[in-house]
Image (tube, helix red, strand yellow):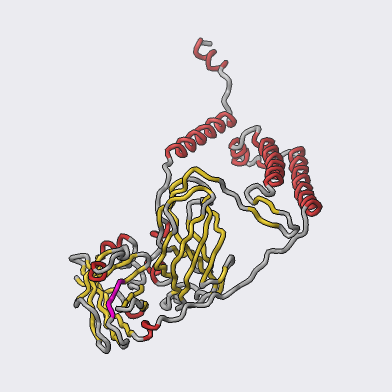
Amino acid sequence: MSQLQRSASNRPHEGHAGWARRLSLTAVAVLVLLIGLAAPAWAHGEEGQQAFEKTATVTFYDVKFSTAELDIGQELTITGTMRVMESWPDHTLAAPELGFLSINQPGPVFFVTERWMSDTFTPQSVKIHKGATYKFKIVAKARIPGNYHIHPTFAVHDAGTLVGPGQWVTIADAGEFNVPIKLATGETVEMTTFGIGNVVAWTVIAFVIAAAYLVYWMRKGLLWRAFPVAEGRGASIISKGQVKVSVAIAVLALLVGVGSYAYAELTTGPKVPPQVARVEPAAAEVDALGKQLKVHVDSAVFQTGTGRLEFTLTVTNNSPQPVLLQKLQFGTYQAINRDVAAGSTAPDTGELVTVTPPGQIRPGETRTLTVDLDGAALAKHGLLPLNEAQIRVTGLVFFTDATGQTAISEVNELTTGILPKY
């Protein structure tokens, strides 16, 4: 026998288990590499919603944040008005009957302490209906330092969460976060630490049991079992001893679960089941000026060559005062009449647009107005649905008179299909 043959015969034989270990190590290495290369994601999830979801469902306006900078433990107040649109697409989404007011935030960086709709305290979901307008207020306590983009939101049952305009808010690394709550026993506890000991203890117990069971099965590797199965020897993989260990672990887990429940019953005080109270906030009354204006949308024509959206509407002013078109709003996008912005000391933020013909609409006058909108700006916000199943523009039109009264008219989607012009 040659030296080469003797060397080969003395080399230990590498069976299925060896190849399985190599494959497992390779898979783990690839997974670690992919995790290490992953970059943080920075995006606005609401931009992924279709245009009709952002414009024809719930529209937020006059939204104000009490501050842009605060310390831990200080409160941020968000106020504004939201309208459940009369043009709600109930042919696509379920009719709006139940909603919940909250905020959109990247994790629990704020703790919401108060929710108000139409001066009604609304800690839970509330009854709503199409065409209703509600003033709202959200109070949230700063919890984790950082710079965050915060939005008011309104989640509608069977329709999803609708997002209002947002603002960057900075929480400085100063101050202290606490939430004292008085229990039914009269005792005041700190909610940030209340019950943490029990949570940690039972989590550790469950983890130890699960880890022991996992180690028991993984001590010989995992992928090697695939080879006996492929060769028709699957019944030989699990022994009677392993079955007994599995049964013992299952019994132990059951005893721990029952024991934890019994422990909680014996050591905790009086209990009150979660309470459900479906209140119905009062919808705001239609403004006096709005009752005297008649607004009809004639057309919305998208100029494909210039990227402009030509919006035409006819307005009849039956009020005793001249009125002026102040702005249009589609979702969170605002188109401000440049004539109004020029004469205001604190104009609304948004895109300045030209309204033709300019000037006020006199009492008793009917006038056709054309608004030149930037289609690119609408498309940037996902509000120009040229490639969607519902090619429509839906939003609100705001008017104002010399006395400061404001009228809001809804642009009904049934009359505003976008007509591309080539």
234 or 144, which is in the foreground?
144
| Quadrant location, the C terminus | bottom left
- Inspect this view and state whether residue 235 appears: no
x and y percentages locating residue 149 in the rendered image: 42, 53
x and y percentages locating residue 292 in the rendered image: 35, 86
Is residue 341 positioned above or below 112 on the image?
Answer: below
Is residue 386 positioned above or below 37 on the image?
Answer: below
Is residue 125 positioned above or below 267 on the image?
Answer: below
Q: Taken as a whole, is the magenta stretch helix, strand or loop?
A: strand
User: Hey, which quadrant is residue 337 in on the image?
Assistant: bottom left
- Inspect this view and state whether residue 192 appears: yes
User: Hey, which quadrant is residue 81 in on the image?
Assistant: bottom left
User: Hey, which quadrant is residue 336 in on the image?
Assistant: bottom left
What residue do we see at 79% from left, 48% from top?
255
Is residue 114 shown left or right of residue 63?
Answer: right
98 or 169, which is in the foreground?
169
406 or 234, which is in the foreground?
406
What segment carries the magenta color? 323-327
357 or 173, which is in the foreground?
173
x and y percentages locating residue 91 in the rendered image: 45, 76
Is residue 113 shown left or right of residue 33?
Answer: right
Is residue 248 positioned above or below 13 on the image?
Answer: below
Is residue 302 shown left or right of residue 131?
Answer: left
In the rendered picture of this protein, how many numbered marks are placed on residues? 0
- Magenta stretch: includes residue 77: no
